Image (cartoon, rainbow, N blue to C red):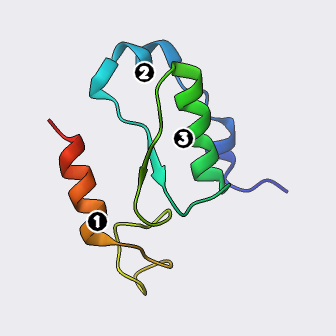
Amino acid sequence: MRNSPAVQDFVPDLEALRALGDRLVVACGADSGETWAARGARSIAAQIGVEVVELPGGHTGFAPPGHGGPGGDPAGFAALLRALLP
């Protein structure tokens, strides 16, 4: 049985991602551990030669607890995200 076949079958255009330069920020939740979303971010980052930015919380670090997941640190997430944006 396959979980999320569209995600598993997706093949990113690595050259197109590299071409974005510093306009692309690859990020994952600091508390995401080895979840598939975090592993995907780390894999893409490694393949295109950039560092992964860890945002506060997990996969739903932008949401307060009780809103679709364990939640995280919305204020910390927003502050770091704002700092990353041009």
Which residue is more in the foreground, 10 or 28?
Answer: 28
Name which quarter of the figure residue 21 lies in.
top left
Q: Earlier in the sequence, mark 2 or mark 3?
A: 2
Residue in the picture at 59% in, 22% down: 47
**Marks 2, 1: nearer the viewer:** 1
The x and y percentages for residue 30 are 50, 58
Q: Write down the residue under mark 3.
A: 41
Q: Earlier in the sequence, mark 2 or mark 1?
A: 2
The amino acid pointed to by label 3 is Ala
Image quarter in which the N terminus is found: bottom right
The x and y percentages for residue 28 are 48, 50
Indicate whether 26 appears above or below 79: above
Q: Write down the residue under mark 2.
A: 17
**Marks 2, 3: nearer the viewer:** 3
The amino acid pointed to by label 1 is Gly
Image quarter in which the C terminus is found: top left
**Residue at the right extreme, as displayed:** 1
The amino acid pointed to by label 2 is Leu
Q: CA distance from mark 2 to mark 1?
A: 27 Å
Q: Secondary structure at mark 3?
A: helix
The x and y percentages for residue 55 are 39, 55
Q: Is residue 21 left or right of 72 when viewed as pictured?
A: left
The 10 Å Cα crowd at callout 1, few under 14, some 14 to 19, many 20 or more, is some
Q: CA distance from mark 2 to mark 3?
A: 12 Å
The x and y percentages for residue 45 are 52, 30
Name which quarter of the figure residue 57 lies in.
bottom left
Residue in the picture at 58% in, 27% down: 46
Q: Secondary structure at mark 1?
A: helix
Q: How many marks?
A: 3
**Marks 3, 1: nearer the viewer:** 1
Q: Write down the residue under mark 1.
A: 76
